[in-house]
Amino acid sequence: MPKVKEEYFENKKNFIIDCTYKVCLRKPVSMVTMMDIIEETGLSQGGIYRFYKNLDEILSDMITRMRIDYNFVDSMEEITRNSDLTFEETTYKICEILGDVMEKHLMDIQKINFDLTTLAINEPERAARIIEGTSGRGNFEYLGSVLMPMLVQASEANNLHPKDEPVKILKYISATYTGIETNCILSACYRNKLVNVKCSPKEMFELLAKTIIFLFGGNV
């Protein structure tokens, strides 16, 4: 494909992704239709199908873009490379990053991520196809690869038994993250009457850090 034509093609795809993102901020992802995207872009129905076969292909590219914008890998790597930090300091810093990033994107990317989770629950096969079309490593795949050896090391240092304790704690961290995300999103984006207390991601992740440290017998 000639360079000019290739750039034109990519620019158009980026424009469609931008428009899809705007629509997903206004509507639950599961309710977004191809007609919504067509209306937002101003393209004809035939025009948009020149670039994407279907809506799920667009969502795959949108998620790939979101992975770049919602990125805490660089900050995490900076922490994990610092061998002078104690287990407690590392835990606090990791949770601080998670809280900062979630709070920064609570009303945009985090809202869409929440919608995608709901989509995965209700339409698992469709969600699997969408994720299969994405590229790049997700933040949480990376986070798991960082936390697991860290928890194993802390477990061995504190003689925790049984030996599968780090696995259980990693599952607990994952479940707690989802709980924080859900409550903060419902509170901030949906004004759910069941969540009548304003949730701050930073406060919640600070408490999570203290809980993890406490589980390993550290000083909070």
Image (tube, helix red, strand yellow):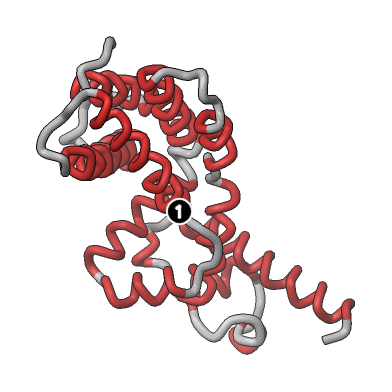
Q: Quadrant of residue 33?
A: bottom left
- Please indicate whether residue 179 sits to the left or right of residue 67 in the image: left
Q: Total label count?
A: 1
Point 29% across, 39% down: residue: 177
- Please indicate whether residue 61 sits to the left or right of residue 169 in the image: right
Point 55% across, 32% down: residue: 81
Q: Position of residue 157 (x, y in %)?
A: 27, 25
Q: Position of residue 72 (x, y in %)?
A: 53, 40
* Residue 43 against residue 137 in the figure, above or below: below
- Please indicate whether residue 35 sits to the left or right of residue 218 in the image: right
> Which residue is label 1 attached to?
26
Relative to the observer, which residue lies in front, 17 or 65?
Answer: 65
Q: Amino acid at mark 1?
A: Arg
Q: Quadrant of the C terminus?
A: top left
Relative to the observer, which residue lies in front, 127 or 86?
Answer: 86
Q: Quadrant of the N terminus?
A: bottom right
Q: Position of residue 203 (x, y in %)?
A: 34, 20
Point 27% across, 19% down: residue: 210
* Residue 92 against residue 193 in the figure, above or below: above
Q: Confirm whether residue 23 shows in the render.
A: yes
Q: Position of residue 128 (x, y in %)?
A: 35, 73
Label 1 Cα neighbours within 10 Å, binned few <14 / some 14-19 / many ≥20:
few
Point 54% across, 72% down: residue: 58
Kindly state the secondary structure of the residue where label 1 is placed: helix
* Residue 203 against residue 28 in the figure, above or below: above
Q: Confirm whether residue 186 shows in the render.
A: no
